[in-house]
Image (tube, grey):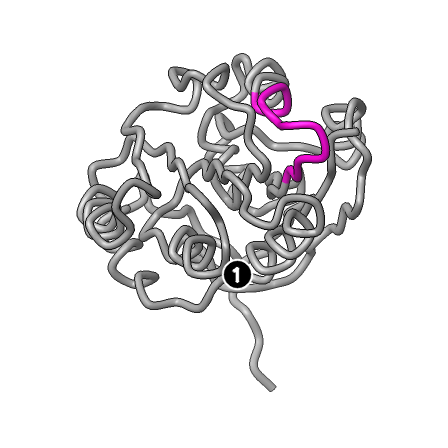
Amino acid sequence: MNTLTAPKAPTESIDWHLYCRNTRNKPPSDLARSSLALSKRTRPCPHVLELGPGSCADARFFLENGADTVTAVDASTAVRPYASALANEFLGRFMLQPVLFRDFGFDDGPYDLIFAQHSLQYHGTEGFDSLVGRIIGSLAPGGVFAATFIGTDHFVKKFWSDLAFSSRVDVERRLASLRIVDVREQREMKYAHECQGLVNHFIVMATRP
């Protein structure tokens, strides 16, 4: 029987260039599929805001499946070649804002779908509640917020304590102004960040009344 080894300290920093290369051809995530389907019930051609697009695989899925526009926010230089290629392919429909989340002008919304998968935690703990409030505030009425929050039991907490970890209570408190469609907790032993251990996330979909 295969067993996982005890977690060790992950690498000090993530190689985002390698991450983007390894994920550039991945299929769209389940959260991307389900959130776009939910958004299109009320907005057939939604305006999408994606926080942390990585190699832009999910952004491509949105654009190929009915999104009117996708605005992506990511300060990493690793994202830029993939974003540039997508912008050239979908002229006038895709735009990258190469800034930190806290520096983005959320007032430029509103957006019909806001998508943030495995990205919000890198903002860090300081001002995290305020950031989530600004994000939610840029949702259009009936808009969909789809995101993941890294859980307090995730094994990287003992190594990267400055990430924004969340409990279920934290997540539901931050979503108090929205109608929660689904909050699922992921708890599984798996390989992540060049290590093995308990991975813990909350996968969220909610709509603005």
Magenta residues span: 135-145
> Where is residue 98 drawn, in percent x and y?
27, 29
Residue at image coords 59%, 53%: 36
- Residue 151: image quadrant is top right
Residue at image coords 34%, 61%: 23
> Where is residue 192 drawn, in percent x and y?
46, 57
The one of 96 and 93 positioned closer to us in this rendering: 93
| Location of mark 1 (residue) | 29
Q: What element carries label 1?
A: loop
> Relative to 25, is 109 on the left or the right?
right
Q: In this view, does 78 lie above or below 74?
A: below
Residue at image coords 60%, 23%: 132
The one of 82 and 186 positioned closer to us in this rendering: 82
- Residue 75: image quadrant is top left
> Where is residue 117 drawn, in percent x and y?
52, 45
Query: Is 4 inside the magenta-drawn segment?
Result: no
Q: Quadrant of the N terminus?
A: bottom right
Q: Is residue 99 above or below residue 84?
A: above
The one of 41 and 199 positioned closer to us in this rendering: 41
The one of 154 and 5 positioned closer to us in this rendering: 154
Query: Is 141 inside the magenta-drawn segment?
Result: yes
Amino acid found under the numbered disc labelled 1? Ser
Residue at image coords 48%, 36%: 49
- Residue 110: image quadrant is top right
